[in-house]
């Protein structure tokens, strides 16, 4: 039986019923739906719209449905249009006529808006905690590898010496900003749409501030049409999720490159790699590749919902049912990706000697050699050119700059004396440069 069957004379086509039904995916919202109904019923009693007995019975009925769903004795399936119809039908099975009073002064439009806001808020909080856990793993990895130096890159070419700690702390900064974005999105969405009803509120004298408080919202929404018909808060969260995935994907990309034989900077644990069915020697960084791949999927959810919403007239339109699957999918994708990344980093092996070797053969103290000549009185542009020819010479001889004798250096310039070796020592460059920033 449909919730809205009254004005219809012909039954819905089976094709249409299947096309319209959202139960297979909005069953995810059963907890939020029951929480919303509990707050609503308490408010209806407080405002004198339901009697005390009716309130008590409906609350007991809803709690019974919740515990049966949770213990597995009530499966969410069957010929119901959505989770809202399912729960109302189950309540009516238990209570008879009284169950039918639950929906007084409410529409599924404000009901689903409440469910989605509660769900979005809860998941955003979980994702903040998971991002914080990842930050802690990055910090531990830095501490474990304190003092490890590596090349810093621009254009994927070795540029200047940095520490692994500095590299990892760039990601820590990114993830900290991601958390700020999520907190901000939560603050913006934290308003109560319950009581907007279909689009124009209700003639009953209801108390929206009461349900706001019951459900943990900061206040009721200002405008009824807006409350039931915008999904900007989901779009904002999807945008924040996409940025987190973008950061995870860049980190994944680096782990993939660093774990190649060509780099050899790190070793990803066997737990997070797979082999090849044909090439026995292979160990593939699948976990990192999947995070990189799933990033596209989360971007897809963002673009999908932006597109769904872009031409909808006010207020509710059924198109908006299409918010759920992409949002739920993005939530589970980002949660899995954050967890896998944290676990993969916990078991990561750093090959510090390979990193150091890349620093040495990358002429990463060339800028310091030029700075040295400038201190001795040479104009920077001339120093830059001169060090360029030293690098060419070193490449020819397969030597690092610090491996050249003073004699060799003096063939390029008489400004060089013994002090050059200490000046271009990698640790000294770090102390003079990056360390300042870390303070
Ligand atoms: N399943 C619907 C959705 O997700 C619930 C709201 C239905 N409202 C309506 N007027 N048919 O959007």
Image: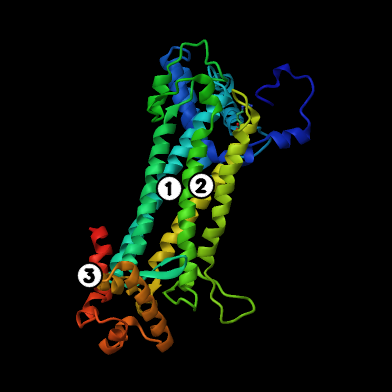
Q: Residue 55, how many percent across, how many down?
A: 46, 20
Quarter the N terminus occupies: top right
Identify the secondary structure beneath mark 1.
Answer: helix
Quarter the C terminus occupies: bottom left
Specify whether tag 2 is near ligand 1 (CB below 8 Å): no
Q: Residues within 10 Å of mark 2 (few under 14, many from 20)?
A: many
* Residue 331, label in figure: 2
Residue pushed farthest left? 419
Q: Which residue is label 3 attached to?
A: 375
C-beta proximity under 8 Å, tags 1 and 2 = yes
Quarter of the displayed picture in which ligand 1 can be seen: top right
C-beta proximity under 8 Å, tags 1 and 3 = no
The mark lying in front, picked from 3 and 2, is 3
The mark lying in front, picked from 1 and 3, is 3
| Residue found 68% across the figure and 26% down from its top | 2
Identify the secondary structure beneath mark 2.
Answer: helix
Q: Residue 204, how many percent across, how many down?
A: 50, 11
* Residue 390, label in figure: none
| Residue found 41% across the figure and 16% down from its top | 46
Q: Which residue is label 1 attached to?
A: 127
Q: Residue 227, how many percent across, how many down?
A: 51, 24
Identify the secondary structure beneath mark 3.
Answer: helix
Q: Residue 12, how many percent across, how many down?
A: 76, 28
Give the mark nearer the N terminus: 1 vs 2.
Answer: 1
């Amino acid at each position: 039986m449909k919730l809205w069957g009254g004005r219809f004379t012909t039954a819905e086509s089976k094709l249409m019923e299947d096309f319209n039904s959202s139960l297979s995916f909005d069953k995810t919202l059963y907890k939020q739906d029951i929480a919303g109904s509990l707050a609503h019923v308490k408010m209806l009693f407080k405002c004198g719209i339901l009697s005390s007995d009716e309130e008590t019975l409906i609350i007991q009925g809803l709690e019974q449905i919740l515990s049966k769903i949770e213990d597995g004795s009530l499966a969410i399936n069957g010929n119901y249009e959505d989770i809202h119809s399912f729960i109302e039908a189950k309540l009516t099975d238990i209570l008879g006529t009284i169950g039918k009073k639950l929906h007084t002064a409410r529409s599924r439009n404000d009901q689903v808006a409440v469910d989605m806001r509660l769900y979005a808020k809860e998941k955003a909080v979980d994702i903040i905690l998971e991002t914080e856990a990842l930050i802690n793993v990055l910090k531990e990895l830095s501490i474990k590898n304190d003092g490890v130096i590596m090349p810093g890159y621009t254009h994927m070419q070795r540029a200047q010496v940095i520490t692994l700690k500095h590299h990892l702390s760039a990601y820590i900064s990114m993830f900290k900003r991601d958390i700020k974005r999520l907190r901000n999105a939560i603050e913006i969405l934290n308003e109560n749409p319950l009581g907007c009803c279909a689009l124009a509120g209700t003639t009953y004298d209801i108390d929206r501030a009461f349900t706001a408080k019951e459900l943990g919202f900061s206040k009721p929404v200002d405008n009824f049409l807006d409350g039931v018909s915008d999904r900007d808060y989901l779009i904002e969260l999807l945008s924040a999720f996409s940025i987190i995935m973008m950061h995870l994907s860049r980190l994944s990309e680096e782990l993939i490159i660093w774990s190649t034989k060509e780099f050899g900077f790190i070793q990803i644990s066997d737990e997070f790699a797979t082999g090849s069915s044909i090439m026995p020697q292979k160990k593939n960084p699948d976990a990192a590749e999947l995070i990189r791949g799933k990033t596209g999927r989360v971007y897809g959810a963002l673009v999908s919902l932006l597109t769904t919403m872009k031409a909808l007239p006010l207020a509710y339109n059924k198109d908006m049912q299409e918010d759920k699957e992409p949002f739920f999918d993005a939530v589970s994708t980002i949660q899995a990706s954050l967890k896998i990344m944290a676990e993969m980093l916990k078991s990561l092996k750093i090959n510090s000697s390979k990193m150091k070797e890349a620093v040495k053969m990358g002429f990463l103290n060339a800028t310091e050699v030029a700075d040295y000549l400038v201190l001795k009185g040479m104009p920077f542009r001339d120093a830059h050119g001169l060090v360029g020819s030293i690098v060419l010479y070193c490449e020819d001889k397969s030597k690092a700059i610090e491996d050249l004798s003073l004699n060799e250096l003096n063939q390029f310039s008489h400004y060089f004396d013994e002090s050059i070796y200490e000046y271009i020592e990698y640790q000294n460059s770090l102390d003079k440069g990056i360390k300042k920033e870390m303070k």
